[in-house]
Amino acid sequence: MRLTIAALVLSTTCAFAGGFVVKDVRVFDGDRTIEKTDVAVRDGRIVSVGSGVASRGLETIEGRGKTLLPGLIDAHVHVFPGAQQDALRFGVTTELDMFSMLPFLKDWQEQRRSLRRTSGADTWSAGIGVTAPGGHPTEMSGPFTVPVLAPGDDARAFVDKRVKEGSDYIKVIIEDLAEYPGRAPMPTLSRDQVCAVVSAAHADGKMAVVHVQTEAAAREAMDCGADGLAHLYPDRPADPVMVAQVKAHGMFIETTAAVWAGASGTGMADKLAADPRVALYLSQAQLRSLAYRGKTTMPDFFSNALASIRRYHAAGVPLLASTDAPNPSTAHGVSLHEELQIYVQAGYTPAEALHAATGAPADVFHLGDRGRIRKGDRADLVLVDGDPTRDIADTLSIERIWKNGFAVDRAPKEIRR
Ligand SMILES: [Zn+2]
């Protein structure tokens, strides 16, 4: 009941869409921190960043003691109905979907170009990824029949079809389950097929992002000229020679460390779900997904991922904060905050971690007017209490979220209790 009243008060505030200025606030602008400034928003866009702006006609929001962040970007998720709303209620204003069967790609493209009010995060998507008959993730596709690339099929024709459907980039899957000892191997694309798909993606002007969970698979992706890895492979700590080669190839890596934390049984997801700054805002889908456990515990995955984040970061390889939600122990939106905490645990400064969820993915995926607090960019903003540039866990102390300049209602669809 208390939440119902809070939600009503919040929705009344939401009606104000003319413009606002956040005064005397600390700003992390996607790259660096400005200790005290003003940020003004009008008609869905940031119109100025700097002290002493004319704020006549604008709602004034006191920013002292608070920090304004660009809307966060999760660089690896799987969207299902309701997921984009779950993401937005935790300050994730943009999601990069890495395999989806939903027939909404053109709608998502239209949405992310507009500045209209929305209750969900904007989305870029791989659409249908490229996998072998019986390959991952066909084992979990439920009622869907996943189109697959069989031996002898034309990779170029397969990729062209995805591009026509609206795929923003091409997801390729190398997965034989070698990282799970004792499990029967799974069919996967041949090396020649992977190389052919990467070439086809490039011929269509699209990036190729490759699912790998072993260093051997990562090497194959690199040798085929892939642009990025969809996971920081957790089967071993990254080999220093491999790290140098990935850097030389100019690749990026979506870390998905939150999912490895879950696989190793760290309990981070339970801690997150119980945090009073989080608990009230979780939807049933988020609660279920955070509590869900995979079949096997892989004790080394998380420590391997931490070591690899440290090495790849030291080498200057762009790492993109990403959750792989809704895989076991992760949920849309909320788990990106855990991912940021893991980056800091691995040796990132808090500001570097924030960059990995804002400026870095915006640059790598050419997302345009987002990921930064910059004059002219769309007003996707998160105001938090405290200073996440010093204590990264402060990103959870969300006071307000704006999407396209509109205040976001944080109450979940089901008001619980
Ligand atoms: Zn995934």
Image (cartoon, helix red, strand yellow):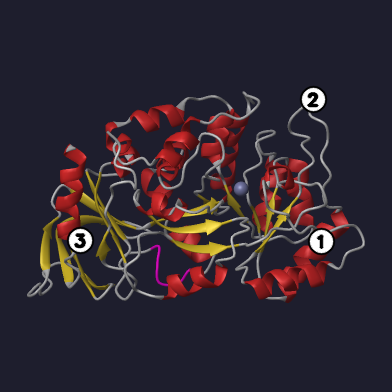
Please report whichever mark, 2 or 3, sits nearer to the chain's N-terminal start.
3
Q: Are marks 1 and 3 in contact (CB under 8 Å)?
A: no
Most foreground residue, 112 or 32? 112
**Badge 3: residue crowd in 10 Å (few <14, some 14–19, many ≥20):** some
Query: Over which residues does the magenta segment extend?
Result: 367-371
User: Looking at the image, which residue is at 17% across and 38% down?
Assistant: 2
Q: Which residue is mark 3?
A: 14
Please report whichever mark, 1 or 2, sits nearer to the chain's N-terminal start.
2
Is residue 23 a member of the stretch shown in magenta? no
The percent coordinates of residue 125 (x first, y second) are: 57, 62
Most foreground residue, 163 or 338? 163
Q: Amino acid at mark 2?
A: Gly
Q: Quadrant of the N terminus?
A: top left
Which numbered tag is attached to residue 182?
2
Q: Amino acid at mark 3?
A: Cys
**Badge 2: residue crowd in 10 Å (few <14, some 14–19, many ≥20):** few
Real-space CA distance between mark 1 and mark 3, rounded to the nearest whole angstrom = 49 Å
The percent coordinates of residue 325 (x first, y second) are: 52, 45
Real-space CA distance between mark 1 and mark 2, rounded to the nearest whole angstrom = 29 Å
The percent coordinates of residue 56 (x first, y second) are: 7, 75
Most foreground residue, 235 or 183? 183
Select label 1 or label 3 by which is in front: 3
Please report whichever mark, 1 or 3, sits nearer to the chain's N-terminal start.
3
Q: Are marks 1 and 2 in contact (CB under 8 Å)?
A: no
Tell me the chief SS of the magenta region. loop
Which numbered tag is attached to residue 195?
1
- Helix, strand or loop at label 2? It is loop
Q: Amino acid at mark 1?
A: Cys
**Residue 339 placement, left or right of 102:** left
